[in-house]
Image (cartoon, coloured by chain):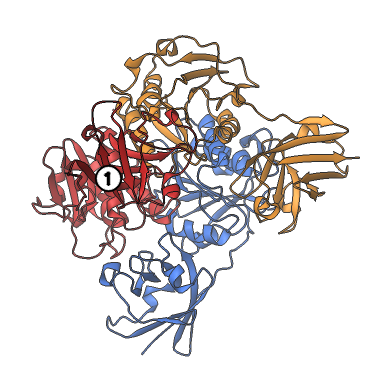
Chain colours: A red, B orange, C blue
Amino acid sequence: MADPLITLTTDFGAGSPYVAAMKGVILTINPAARIVDLSHEIPPQDVRHAAFFVAAALPYFPPDAIHMLVVDPGVGSERAALFVESGGMRLLAPDNGCWTLLTRERAAPRVIRLAEPRYWRTTVSATFHGRDVFAPVAAYLSLGIHPQELGPDETHWVELQWPFPLRMDGLLHGEVVFVDHFGNLITNLRGDDLPNEPHTPIRVSLNGQVVDRLVRTYSDGSPGEVVALVSSFGLLEVAEIQGNASARLQVSRGDLVRVEWK
Amino acid sequence: MADPLITLTTDFGAGSPYVAAMKGVILTINPAARIVDLSHEIPPQDVRHAAFFVAAALPYFPPDAIHMLVVDPGVGSERAALFVESGGMRLLAPDNGCWTLLTRERAAPRVIRLAEPRYWRTTVSATFHGRDVFAPVAAYLSLGIHPQELGPDETHWVELQWPFPLRMDGLLHGEVVFVDHFGNLITNLRGDDLPNEPHTPIRVSLNGQVVDRLVRTYSDGSPGEVVALVSSFGLLEVAEIQGNASARLQVSRGDLVRVEWK
Amino acid sequence: MADPLITLTTDFGAGSPYVAAMKGVILTINPAARIVDLSHEIPPQDVRHAAFFVAAALPYFPPDAIHMLVVDPGVGSERAALFVESGGMRLLAPDNGCWTLLTRERAAPRVIRLAEPRYWRTTVSATFHGRDVFAPVAAYLSLGIHPQELGPDETHWVELQWPFPLRMDGLLHGEVVFVDHFGNLITNLRGDDLPNEPHTPIRVSLNGQVVDRLVRTYSDGSPGEVVALVSSFGLLEVAEIQGNASARLQVSRGDLVRVEWK
């Protein structure tokens, strides 16, 4: 049997001593744990970015992985620390909504509030629960303790407010929900909501600019051309071929998108 | 026996959900795979940078490692996806030349075109073959399937156009082929092509500036001094001691270099 | 028994071919080694940053881990390459002081000068001992060779000059020793040296600016507020809530801090 997997997603920055400390804590409790870095580049305290990230990435992992999400502006406050299980996926996260987008289309989650200090570090700092609570709990879970031991069931938690697309007056209204490393603008509009007919003319408006070329893949456009396509996540995306659409169009996350077709 | 190694080299950016998704796909197919991140910081779509990177790094790995190279501006087009084996080294890459520098001085490569969808994800997106083709194929290879099963032999592939140095009129002409994180300028001129006599005066010209101090290592120069040396890759390099030569000399990749000596 | 751990801390930059080459060298010698990236984002040649980083991170690791520190402005010069063992912790580093802060509060270190080329790569470059000396030695250590075999005991080494706080005229004088990814300013003043009374008014002065709000954790302040707190490392820290104190106050490492209270 393969050694247990623990994935890390944080806003600590690559090369942060905070990430290193968490890895040390995990490996001290379970030397056999295999740690997989997913991202330490979530923008600081950006719960919404984290939510999209984990919804995009975690479903690809095997069900026995344990996922740690540490984007935690409320650390040290009364916000709870949670264990969540949904459709076989297990994660640990602060109760700030960073995980709720992920479980929206899965089985109803089982949520436990972390309340058993014997699975935490002996001294818990007020500012670093990643090291003092989440990391040791992840390590103990990877050793096989039952989630039930971590604390009581929780029936209330913070739901992320997520912008859902709207169909109105024959138009689709949405917004940019993620900008990737290439500057591609990923929207909350699902490819499935666009017309099925492949040659239907389509007009995507963002920030007063119109993109009317819908392509299947980047190489269908010419370098420098701005195109729309259905991304690998199944969402409408606007990209500049071999360029950066976010910089080119001056569009960033939260900006509105409107799609119309005949 | 150690668990199989799969290395990742991409232009997706550290902390990209695309990298995370690929890791999940690999670990779902082969939970025992050990994933080693090499770089996710190849500049976007920069096949030439990728080529230098893998030529510099992959030869140090054990021969049974499987290397994934995903720098893929032509994704979704007719460009083939390849398995390459050369001198015991195995890699997966798009057919855009990103690997050919690496095998230039090795045994003639065996190249197979990936054509067997049963080793791919069930649905292959038009924009993300890293996740849908390369990652699952790498995972199946790490489980021991024979490369023969992946598709037919390929006899034609894109060769990277790489600038080779030229000796003319008693001068060596080359160019900067890589700028590292320290701003050191690595050229395509081999240390072996420089004069053997250790005290031969040498003049390296870049962008109208002359460097005439050839040292053995950085600590032979003074902080702020610009020197030439033979880098750990065996190539002529220009460095500013404890500084950034690229910024200081305003020289970047592709800029010409000329070396003369008596 | 779990496979042996080797951690990497360098200033090579994420995605550097130098890091990739070191990983290849380690895995060629010991295919079972588990490599854990701690940081490749130490600022170039910044021994002081490296010293703080490893003092903050390495104590969390299990004692059998082998830690490689490659921040090495003196590479190729006469500076020694060292093996250090202290309180069960084992590390490899150049003799430039980058590790001495770490062992200051531990058992007296045992230090060995690396002098046995049979544990190095056959050819040792003048500029890259990370690949040619430290990586192979780490791999051989992980295979179980005895440190004694690496070279002779060393009794002299470079001690890092580290600013220690000063109590004078009823004031505590210190400086900023680390700025994290969030822009939080971490000082060399220990929380234990501050008044025990929780409500004692305190004034922290940096760069002509005064912070007089001492909180327990970030969420005790309002977004945009600049506060002082005792960080998870036990050191006095100045932070802007959901902001960047370094940018806001124009304070960076080395800047002086003064604390007074009634």
- Farthest right residue? B262
Residue beneath label 1, please?
A258
Between C259 and A142, the residue placed more toward the observer is C259
Between B77 and B67, the residue placed more toward the observer is B77
Q: What element carries label 1?
A: strand
Q: Position of residue B141 (x, y in %)?
A: 40, 19
Between B148 and A137, the residue placed more toward the observer is B148
Instruction: Say whether residue A250 is left or right of residue A170.
Output: right
Three-letter code for the amino acid on which mark 1 is drawn: Arg
Q: Position of residue B78 (x, y in %)?
A: 45, 20
Q: Which residue is drawn at 56% across and 18% down?
A: B86
Q: Residue at x 82, y 49 (%)?
A: B212
Q: Position of residue A259 (x, y in %)?
A: 27, 41
**Residue B105 seen:** yes
Instruction: Say whether residue B197 is left or right of residue A43.
Output: right
**Residue A32 seen:** no
Between C175 and A53, the residue placed more toward the observer is A53
Report how many numbered discs are placed on residues in the image.
Answer: 1
Q: Quadrant of the N terminus of chain A?
A: top left
Q: Where is residue A128 in the image (x, y as percent from the top left)?
A: 31, 60
Mark 1 crowd level (few <14, some 14–19, many ≥20, 10 Å Cα): many
